[in-house]
Image (cartoon, rainbow, N blue to C red):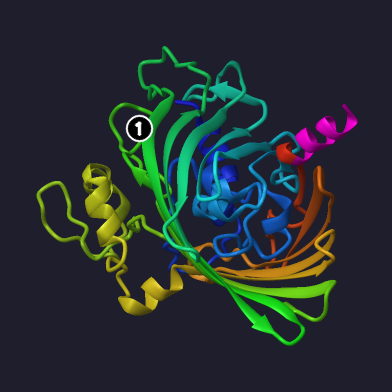
Amino acid sequence: MKKVLLSVIALALASVAAMAQDDYMNPIITAMPSLTITPDARAGGMGEVGVATQADLNSQHWNPAKYAFMESHGGITANYTPWLRKIVGDIDLAYLAGYYKWDDVQGISASFTYFSLGKVDLTDIKGSYLQEARPNEWAIDVAYSRKLHEYVSMAVALRFLYSDLNNGANSSTIDATERYSAWTMAADVSLYYRQPIQLAMGMSYFALGLNISNLGGKMTYDKVTQNFIPANLRLGVSYELPFNQYNSLTFNVEANKMMVPTRISKYATDVDGNPVDPDDPNYSNLTRDWYSELLSMKGLFQSFADAPKGSLEEFQEVQWNMGLEYSYDKKFFARFGYSYENRWKGNRRFFTFGAGFHLSIFSLDAAYTLAASAANPLDNTLRFTLGFDLAGIKDLVNNRK
């Protein structure tokens, strides 16, 4: 049913749309790929790094453990990203996040992600028009963060995921495949280490970040086939170097690995339990049931050693991100970054640029993506972020009384 749904999913999977054509492509494909989209302009301007950067209002997406290092006791932020505008004009990502600290060592945070896939005309398997739909995906989560040491913090998060690709519309055609909304639960575990280092020109900061996200169940759209969600391992390092009292430069490097088994796997078997040769032209059909029935936790551990080409291909699955942030008096920011993904795993390669303006009460950031690979639908992507410091607003109100 509804061939158009396959096109919608393909648009959401930028890794598929950006792939170069060759005889061996083995990208990692999941349900709800919108969870992997960078929601905020600060990270979006620094090559999409965020797990080890200085804590900010959007830490919920990158590393909730960073909230324990926030100086203010509360804040909220709103983010907006027009998505894949080189292909269609009505796909958007909205992201809301906020946190509250009741003391200097612990707090709670939450976020809401809404991904709209625009307007889609649903058809049956014969191509006959059924109705108009507005597919969407959304997720809501809550996290608890706490300092374990002066320089170390940890956080745990719980997330509810929901994906509706056809607004509940199902075809009555006999040879059609019924489609339903899908949902599941997931959890995150994160760590953050940030240590000050006194230098002659000022205080510098070295930071490490780790976030294991979206550990949970699988999702099904037809109540038969089970799809993995984008479980992810993100590890990064950051170093902030001051030049004087007002100027500083922060260097960030990050590695990102999807903890999802590849569809073309050296462990794959057919319905009879027999190993399947990845070069078999019927590989996809032979292994469809095996991949669907693979347990999520087993697939998580298997994802580190399942590539048919061995350790070389496993290393190719790591996406690298690098970013720089220049700060003047912690109020004006200029950002630059680069993201690299292997051509066999999606070929998403792009430069990013960004700027920000922060005051004690509110902050405003913007970012721009410039593709470094041909036919990349991420080219010219814009991101916008508006944030508010609730503690700053409270102090302003109290001072006016």
Examine the rendering and report whether any part of residue 255 can be seen: no
Q: Is residue 389 left or right of residue 130?
A: right
Which residue is at 26% across, 59% downward? 301
Q: Nearer the viewer, residue 116 or 165?
A: 116
Q: Is residue 301 left or right of residue 58?
A: left
Give the quarter of the figure containing the N terminus: top left
Give the quarter of the figure containing the C terminus: top right
Task: Write down the region rendered in magenta.
Answer: 392-401
Vertical arrangement, residue 352 with respect to residue 160, above or below: below
Q: What residue would you read off at disc 1?
A: 220
Examine the rendering and report whether any part of residue 242 can be seen: yes
Magenta span: predominant SS is helix
Which residue is at 51% across, 28% downward? 165
Q: Is residue 144 magenta?
A: no
- Residue 122, picture quadrant: top right
Q: Nearer the viewer, residue 94 or 131?
A: 94
Vertical arrangement, residue 304 with respect to residue 173, above or below: below
- Residue 283 location, x and y as percent? 28, 56
Amino acid beneath label 1:
Thr
Vertical arrangement, residue 188 with respect to residue 191, above or below: above
- Residue 237 location, x and y as percent? 55, 72
- Residue 282 location, x and y as percent? 29, 54
Pick out the residue farthest to the right: 400
Pick out the residue farthest to the top: 172
Which residue is at 71% across, 69% downward? 337
Which residue is at 65% across, 52% downward? 71
Crowdedness of circle 1 by 10 Å Cα count: few (<14), some, many (20+)?
some
Q: How many labels sit on residues? A: 1
- Residue 331, picture quadrant: bottom right
